[in-house]
Amino acid sequence: MGAPSKLGCSESSLKGASYYKLPKVLEWFTGSINLHPAHHFRPEIPNYNLQWFHDTVPFLQTVEPLTIRRSLKSLRLSLWDEKGQNLVSFRTIKRHLQQTESKG
């Protein structure tokens, strides 16, 4: 487990949520769940105003969108690499351990 984070409330709400870039019809079916960072930032805003809020607040534009294609690719990623600060697969960890064992 890594060191505790020193993020503020606003930054934590953005770092801990994904902006899912969905087609408009899926946004409607999901009640704008794709605008989760805006909801975390201001939970009192109703879902029908989240898109407007997301579009007008520059701070929310810093969240990297998650697309359907990218989310499907991430299904094989399972572990958080503290050193690399990214998600990795079990296969990658296994390969790394095998390389480390063969060197030492």
Image: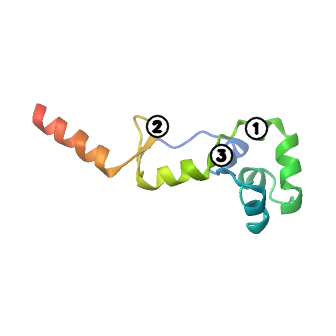
Q: Are marks 2 and 3 in contact (CB under 8 Å)?
A: no
- The picture places residue 44, in percent across and down from the top left corner, at 85, 60
Q: Is residue 11 above or below residue 49?
A: above
Q: Are marks 2 and 1 in contact (CB under 8 Å)?
A: no
Do we see residue 32 in this rendering? no
Where residue 5 sits, quadrant-wise, is top right
Q: Which mark is residue 61?
A: 1
Q: Residues within 10 Å of mark 2 (few under 14, many from 20)?
A: few
Q: Amino acid at mark 1?
A: Gln
| N-terminal label among 3 and 1 | 3
Q: Which residue is mark 2?
A: 85
Which label lies toward us, 3 or 1? 1
| N-terminal label among 2 and 3 | 3
Q: Is residue 36 above or below residue 100?
A: below
Q: Nearer the viewer, residue 27 or 87?
A: 27
Alpha-carbon distance for marks 2 and 1?
21 Å
Q: Nearer the viewer, residue 37 or 31?
A: 31
Q: Which residue is mark 3?
A: 12
Q: Amino acid at mark 2?
A: Gln
Q: Amino acid at mark 3?
A: Ser
Residue at position x 18%, y 36% in the image: 99
* In this rendering, position of residue 99 left or right of residue 85: left
Which label lies toward us, 2 or 1? 1
Where residue 39 sits, quadrant-wise, is bottom right
Q: Secondary structure at mark 3?
A: helix
Give the quadrant of the C terminus: top left
Q: Nearer the viewer, residue 5 or 101?
A: 101
Q: Is residue 62 above or below residue 53?
A: above
